[in-house]
Structures are given as structure tokens and as C-alpha cells.
Amino acid sequence: MNTDFKASGFWRNIKELLPGHRRMLDCVQVAVTSRCMEHCRYCPHTVFKERWQQRDMPMATFERLWPILQRAERVHLQGWGEPLLNSNFFNIAALSRKAGCTVSTTTCGMGLREKQAAALVEAELDIVAPDRHRCREQCCTHRRSI
């Protein structure tokens, strides 16, 4: 991760606590990947599978959002794919946090294992929303207890 990014300063943080001094943007949604292991009927990943390009957002591309992140209350990491498949997911979340944002994501949880779940806890994401309704019925049976 680029170390040139400076966290919000003390006075900026104080200013944001004052009434009427909220950040300009409530939420910035960022598609961090278009890769997914699911085959949801409504998803363009499935509908356009012959033309679908599976790729991850590179960290350098996300870093270019720094000025926008500093103006956002929250960053939601999602997209037409499973965000946790991006190998830079936790670096992206950390940079979002460094910008002073709350961080959330939506995951189908299909690839979620103990090590990755522990990393999610350690990353202190504010919201991890399970998306149980994205996949076909037979895909979801093993996740019903989540």
C-alpha cells in the first residue's frame, strides 16, 4: 500500500464532530471485483457469461479514489462479484478506514473460511452484510445457519 496517504488530521476530525459539518458524501460504493463463484439468475455475471470479464480492481486504481474517500462518511465495498475474492480487499478496507470512513461490504459468504472470517473481524469492518438471496436455492442450503 502507498504510504503517502495521511489519515485525517486532529482538527479535521474535531470539525466533523461539530453540528452541520458532516462529510459531503454519505456513501461511496466501490466495485472491487467482477469475479464470483455464484451463478445467480439475475446477475450480469451469469446472464452475460460469454462476454463477462472477470477481474479485480487493482490497489493503484482504488488509491486514486483517495480525495473522494476523504469526503465520504462510508465506503461500501461490493460490485457484481464477491468482494472477498479481491486479494487487495483488506488493504482497500484499511485505506478506507485511514480516510476516516466507516467501511462495509456485502458478501455471499461462499468462500468464507475461518482464517478469512478472523481477518474480517481484525479489519474491524463496520458492516458485513450477508447476501443470502443472491444465489440459487440449492447453493444456499449450507449457509442457512449463518
Image: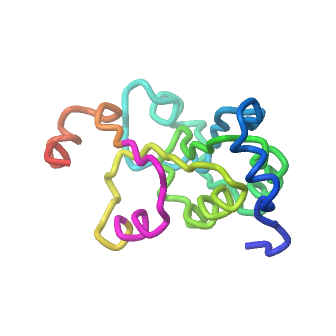
Vertical relation: 115 (above or below) 93: below
> Toward which corner of the image does residue 59 lie, by quadrant?
bottom right
**Left or right: 109 as drawn, with respect to 86:** left
Q: Nearer the viewer, residue 21 or 81?
A: 21
Q: Residue at x 41, y 48 (%)?
A: 128
Q: Quadrant of the N terminus?
A: bottom right
- Locate residue 56, reporting x and y percent: 62, 55
Q: Residue furthest top?
A: 42
Q: Nearer the viewer, residue 82 or 38?
A: 82
> Toward which corner of the image does residue 25 lie, by quadrant?
top right
- Locate residue 91, reporting x and y percent: 62, 67
Q: Nearer the viewer, residue 37 or 25?
A: 25
Q: How many marks?
A: 0
Q: Residue at x 58, y 49 (%)?
A: 102
Q: Residue at x 78, y 61 (%)?
A: 10
**Left or right: 142 as drawn, with respect to 50:** left
Asked if the stretch drawn in magenta spans residue 121, the answer is: yes
**Left or right: 95 as drawn, with respect to 86:** right
Vertical relation: 146 (above or below) 26: below
Q: Nearer the viewer, residue 68 or 46?
A: 68
- Locate residue 125, reporting x and y percent: 48, 56
- Locate residue 64, reporting x and y percent: 83, 54
Colouring scheme applied when the structure was drawn:
rainbow
Q: Which residues are magenta?
A: 117-129
Q: Residue at x 35, y 33 (%)?
A: 134
Asked if the stretch drawn in magenta spans residue 42, the answer is: no
